[in-house]
Amino acid sequence: MIFFKLIFTNLLRHRIRSLISVAGIAFSVAAMLTIVTVLQGAVGMFSGILSSDSEIIVFERNVSDLSRTEHRVAEPIHK
């Protein structure tokens, strides 16, 4: 119990340092959640593109939206 009393006393003595530490931890957790969410979305999008039945995938340059379209631009290539 003395250990928890020491922790609580030091947190009250150094309020600004404690507040900055809590804010840093909260910011780090939020940043990690954002990164994980963006990566999961990208993996889901690319797995959806790669699971289609096409053999050739064409990406347009300087376009951030890579949603799939069902339009046939050309006839399939036969070997």
Image (cartoon, grey):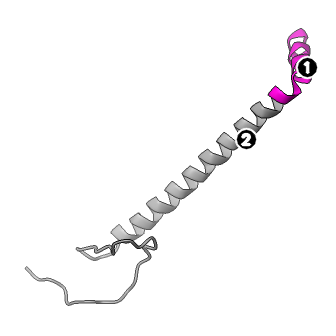
Determine the main secondary structure of the stretch shown in magenta. Answer: helix
Q: Which secondary structure, mark 1?
A: helix
**Which quadrant of the structure image shows residue 70?**
bottom left
Asked if 18 appears above or below 57 in the picture, the reply is: above
Q: What stretch is highlighted in magenta?
A: 1-17
* Residue receiving disc 2: 26
* Residue receiving disc 1: 13
Q: Which residue sits at x=27%, y=89%? A: 73
Q: Quadrant of the C terminus?
A: bottom left
Amino acid residing under circle 2: Ala
Q: Horizontal placement of 54 versus 19: left or right?
A: left
Q: Is residue 37 on the magenta stretch?
A: no
Q: Which residue sits at x=57%, y=56%? A: 37
Asked if 39 appears above or below 65 in the picture, the reply is: above
Q: Horizontal placement of 51 versus 55: left or right?
A: right
**Structural distance between the alpha carbons of marks 1 and 2:** 21 Å
Please provide percent x and percent y for residue 22. Answer: 77, 34
Q: Horizontal placement of 10 versus 61: left or right?
A: right
**Mark 1 or 2, closer to the camera:** 1
Q: Which secondary structure, mark 2?
A: helix
**Which quadrant of the structure image shows residue 16?**
top right
Please provide percent x and percent y for residue 68. Answer: 41, 78
Residue lying farthest to the left in this orientation: 79
Amino acid residing under circle 1: Arg
Callout 1: few (<14), some (14-19), or many (20+) C-alpha neighbours within 10 Å? Answer: few
